[in-house]
Image (spheres, helix red, strand yellow):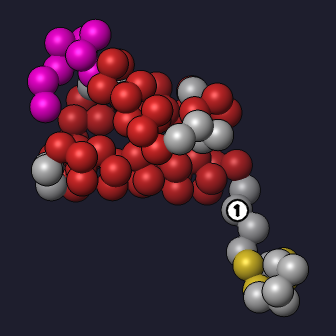
Amino acid sequence: MINNKEGIAMVEFNNEEQIIEFIAFCIENFKVKHGMKGKAVANLFYESKALEFLKDAYEMLHTQSKDYIIEEIEVYLKNRGYKF
């Protein structure tokens, strides 16, 4: 555990935990944008292999804006014939 500059204790995630947090962020924001249930988005990402895409592209994507990330996921899914 580390303290931020305000002295508040913060948990430091390892790389795998950061990727899991990022994927949860993607599922939540995709869900909100498309009016879907979280479970439906999780299933879509699993079936389409978008989870692997997000894991593999984590280093590049996690520094981008929310809108950019969601657009990249949409392009990935559309290129594979998925509709949402």
Split into 4 quadrants, where in the image is the N terminus?
Answer: bottom right
Residue 58: percent from the left, percent from the top?
A: 59, 35
Q: Which residue is drawn at 61% across and 56% down?
A: 17
Q: Give the range drawn in magenta.
A: 77-84
Is 78 covered by the magenta stretch?
A: yes
Q: Residue at x 30, y 26 (%)?
A: 74
Residue 53: percent from the left, percent from the top?
A: 46, 26
Q: Is residue 25 above or below residue 72?
A: below
Q: Residue at x 28, y 10 (%)?
A: 79
Q: Is residue 73 above or below residue 79?
A: below
Left or right, 67 with reference to 5:
left
Split into 4 quadrants, where in the image is the C terminus?
Answer: top left
Q: Which residue is drawn at 24% across and 16% down?
A: 78
Q: Mark 1 points at which residue?
A: 13
- Residue type of the residue flagged with mark 1: Phe
Q: Quadrant of residue 82?
A: top left
Left or right, 5 with reference to 53:
right
Left or right, 60 with reference to 2:
left
Disc 1 packing (10 Å; few <14; some 14–19; many ≥20)? few
